[in-house]
Amino acid sequence: MVDYAWAMLWLTRLVVGGSGIGAVALAVLYAFQERLIYIPKIPGIPSNYEYSPSDFHLEYEDVDLTAKDGTKLHAWYLHPMGWGKATRRQRPTILFFQENAGNMTFRLPFLKLLARYLDCSIFAPSYRGYGRSQGQPNEAGIKLDAQAALEHLLERKDVNKDLIVVLGKSLGGAVALHLASSNPEAFKAVVIENTFLSIEDVAPKMLPFLGPVLGRGKLGNFLIRNKWRNYEAIKKLQHIPMLMLSAGQDEIVPSAHMKALYEEVGGPGNTRITWVDFPDAHHNDVYEIASVRYWPAILAFFQQHVPLDGADASCEPVPPKIMPQKL
């Protein structure tokens, strides 16, 4: 850990030495990085829930959680219409961690298709500061949120504890990797999509003008408190079945990040890891743009590693429909 006083001295020297703009930028990064990294609300879009899972033909339960530090959280427990407790106990449950921007409402089109194709239940917690969850997002807090979600699942009477799969997209992939690395015995399998190596590795793309001082091994990394070092977490999961989904045209997280994570767990030499890339897809549209390959790839992985007797084996493409029309 770099001494704070030394850090401030270093920033002061930058200012005195004629690099004042860069020093101010680094100071802003240090002080306000949670606001730069996490985007609970999308500017110009109402932050309240305008849709519910029932609008997407999913039954749901509103679940209140409390993280270890006392933060109150909201989650949805979702499943196909008409499922009783006995059916839910026979089917897999996916613990889903969402992408960064916006609340869980924006994930409902994807969750609807996920439940349809895999014939599964889904538990979708909102990170602190997102949706109806209280608090402010940061790495340490979100890890507590994820642990609270898992502990809730393990206590439910309508969940088969041997058929829990964790699935995370982008930031959610980071959450999934760290939760699974801390609780490897809890999951039948892990699925990540378009996830980054670490905040330190992705920072130069987010803030190109700070590229000379940010990035793995560089001097300015001590300013990054939210590190999300996924390249370390994934090494602990080499023996768990894992599906890695990567968009070749990812404009937010370069696909090289996913490829590097793949190599961290053994690459093609690790038969427990399934790698699928989608050359023409972007960060947020893989399941729509590449639906002809995307859903069969997920289904094939689950059929190999998770019992899916009732799943939709046809996997015919579904025309994308972002939101239903409200009456």
Image: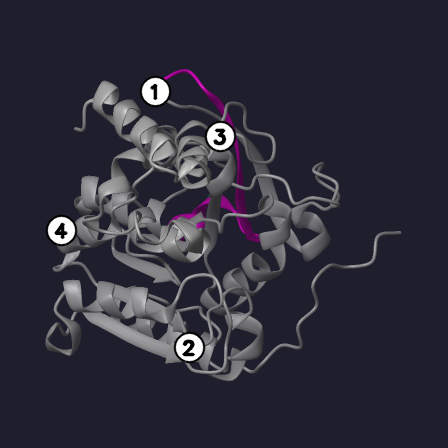
Please tell me whether mark 1 or mark 3 is closer to you in this view.
3
Tag 2: amino acid = Gly
Q: Residues within 10 Å of mark 2 (few under 14, many from 20)?
A: some
Q: Is residue 279 left or right of residue 291?
A: left
Please say whether residue 53 is one of the residues in the magenta stretch: no
Dot 1: element: loop
Mark 4 or mark 2, which has the lower sequence index?
A: 4
Dot 3: element: loop
Mark 2 → mark 1, Cα distance in angstroms? 38 Å
Q: Is residue 238 left or right of residue 67?
A: left
Mark 4 or mark 1, which has the lower sequence index?
A: 1
Please say whether residue 88 is one of the residues in the magenta stretch: yes
List the residue tagged with mark 2.
248
Please tell me whether mark 3 or mark 2 is closer to you in this view.
2
Magenta span of residues: 69-94
Mark 3 → mark 2, Cα distance in angstroms? 31 Å
> Coloring scheme of the render?
one colour
Q: Residues within 10 Å of mark 4 (few under 14, many from 20)?
A: some
List the residue tagged with mark 1.
68
Mark 2 or mark 1, which has the lower sequence index?
A: 1
Identified at 45% across, 58% down, the residue is 120
Mark 4 or mark 3, which has the lower sequence index?
A: 3
Q: Is residue 127 left or right of residue 231?
A: right
